[in-house]
Image (spheres, rainbow, N blue to C red):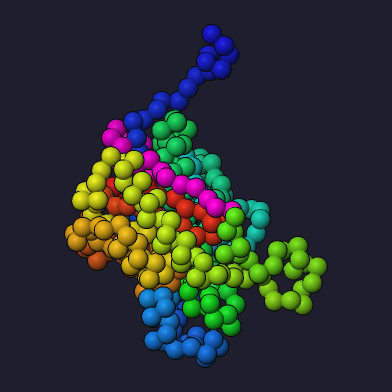
Amino acid sequence: MNAINELKSNPRPAGARLTGLGTYRPKKIVKNEELVAAIDSSDEWIRERSGIKERRMASDDDTVVSMGVAASRAAIKDANVDASEIDLVICSTATHDTLTPHASALIASEIGATNAGAHDLNAACSGFSYGVAESFAQIVSGNARKVLLVGSERMHDFINFNDRTTAFLFGDGAGAVIIEASDTNCIGPVVWGSDGSQSEAIKMSVPWHDYKRDTSQPFPHVQMAGQQVFRWAVGSMAPIALAAIHEAGVTPSDLKAFIPHQANMRITDALVRELQLPDHVVIARDIEVSGNTTAATIPLAMAALRESGAVSRGDLALLLGFGGGLAYSAQVVCLP
């Protein structure tokens, strides 16, 4: 027997499930009318193009960490667990304002998850779905029994509000879930990937080093080739979603909800048409009041459906993340 096989292994559970859900939405609501003058637009144009009528904007006190802490505490309460029981904290974010300390370590400290490992994950708009997959892997490998997964973003720090293609799209907020070991599995296999050949479709205007060398240029902000992203999402993501349904061993008729990344209502509508989902499947459309909150869109949309009574704990939902990278990820889960 070689040495590695002689090492003690952790008990490995049969599967994992989402057991708690919490969110934080900043108090400030920014309606379309407040943005249109700078981009020579109108409320009607924005709604037609994106489906958005308003979004939340973080205050100076609302950081990626503080919003993540608030969402985490709500998720912990919802799951009826103690923070000290959490083995791993993952924060999916593209907008934390320091390279170190990372957001997840600060969140873990604030909530009292003193026994937890912690790391950040940046897969942009697909980050939350990536985090579900990693949480599942850590649990079934025996490395953790309870994971806190957070998606938290302050997108408005990286938006040029004079850019007609992006100024109206984004919002701020955070969502979190508790994922626990389970005797029966409620997280389907992940179907994921990336296409770096199209990375220019969603990118920062300048790299940090270029900005450091010449701070007279505009602060780095998100730029997007909207039509290219639309074509990619509509043309490529439906097969990924169908593959995730197949890998989970269910059919579209088994689903109660479809919760895609809230990128654009037109993209959501096009995906629904492509997927030909049954009429009873509830479609998440939280973008109308939240905008695109990148890694936070899926948990925020999940919570909105549950709060409305449209879904219940244990219902099957298809999650689909896609965006910057270009990266994508999908899986079927039982809702917390």
Q: Is residue 215 magenta?
A: no
**What percent of the width, then of the height, locates residue 125?**
49, 59
Residue extending furthest toward the top: 1
84 or 233, which lies in front?
233
Q: Is residue 184 magenta?
A: yes
**What percent of the width, then of the height, locates residue 159?**
58, 74
Q: The N terminus is located in which quarter?
A: top right
Residue 97: tell me if it is visible: yes
In the picture, measured across the screen, residue 207 lies left or right of residue 47, that is right
Q: Which residue is at 53% across, 77% downward?
A: 165
52 or 143, which lies in front?
52
**What percent of the width, then of the height, locates residue 72?**
43, 55
First to last magenta residue range: 176-196
105 or 264, which lies in front?
264
303 or 159, which lies in front?
159
Q: Which residue is at 39% across, 86% downward?
A: 44
**What percent of the width, then of the height, locates residue 82?**
39, 45
Residue 107 drawn above or below residue 45: above
Residue 305 drawn above or below residue 146: below
Q: Which residue is at 74% across, 68% downward?
A: 211
Quarter of the figure with residue 271? bottom left
Quarter of the figure with residue 216? bottom right
